[in-house]
Image (tube, rainbow, N blue to C red):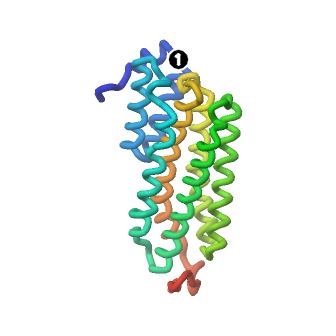
Amino acid sequence: MEGRFDLLELMEQYGIKGLIVFVAVSLIASLFRPEVLNKGIDKISDFFKSGKKDQLVTESNILNHDLFNFIDFWIESTIPTMEFATKFREAVFRKYLIIFMEEYKSGMLSFIKEEKYKSMDEAELWKEFIDIVNKIVANYEKRSIEVGIPPVVVFKMKIKNNDTIKLMMDLVNNISRSDFYESDDNYLKLYSIMNIMLSILENTITNSVVVCDSINGEMRGLKFGDEIEP
């Protein structure tokens, strides 16, 4: 693809460790949403070729990241039209996914607006991100139960989400510790982390259909809103 840089050049400048981290993050994350990750990776490759990291990834890129645009799109357009096995399950899973997305958006916006990330070292950034994700998970699970989503849905989604959350945390850990992603105010690290999160969140939408189909008779007779599970 035009604009991509030479991986041999990357290795010469950042060493084999930098090369491995960049390739691993790029390839694994692109399995979830290739077109979005390619856009993000192109942005990162631009600064590498120019040697001007801080001019190409700015605070504006963070505040206006595609993560927030896609969350809004999913909440307003994608999730309300998703089809599940029954009307009851549609109401339940649509509500769960909307709460899920709202909490990720709220959690990340709060973190960004506090601006503490700008002065964090690699260990602090990694720890802070763990805390953020844990709070987000606790919040969307609590809200889901409070609005009446069946515990079996929350539990089975938790199991499914744990796999992708673990992958996300591993990738974030690599980004946090890599010299390749160093820049003033941690803009490049946070931008890259948000690319990963964007891919993980869309994967959750797909996984919800799989989880729904895996639930057999546990919800028979339950009511959510005006819908009753047959």
Q: Taking 80 as reference, is 110 above or below it?
A: above
Picture quadrant of residue 183: top right
144 vs 163, nearest the viewer: 144
Q: Which residue is located at x 58 percent, y 62 percent?
A: 157
Quadrant for the N terminus in the image: top left
Q: Quadrant of residue 82?
A: bottom left
What residue lies at 48% left-to-right and 37% top-to-bottom? 60
Three-letter code for the amino acid on which mark 1 is drawn: Tyr
Taking the view exactly as shown, the residue that stands out farthest to the top is: 12
Q: Nearer the viewer, residue 210 or 112?
A: 112
Residue 94 place in picture, x, y as percent: 49, 69
Q: Residue 171 appears at what percent x and percent y?
A: 57, 37
What residue is pinned by disc 1?
Answer: 14
Percent x, y of residue 54: 50, 24
Does 44 appear above or below 113?
above
Which residue is located at x 40 percent, y 71 percent?
83
The spot of residue 158 in percent (x, y) is 62, 60
- Residue at coordinates 49% horizontally, 80% vertically from top-left? 88
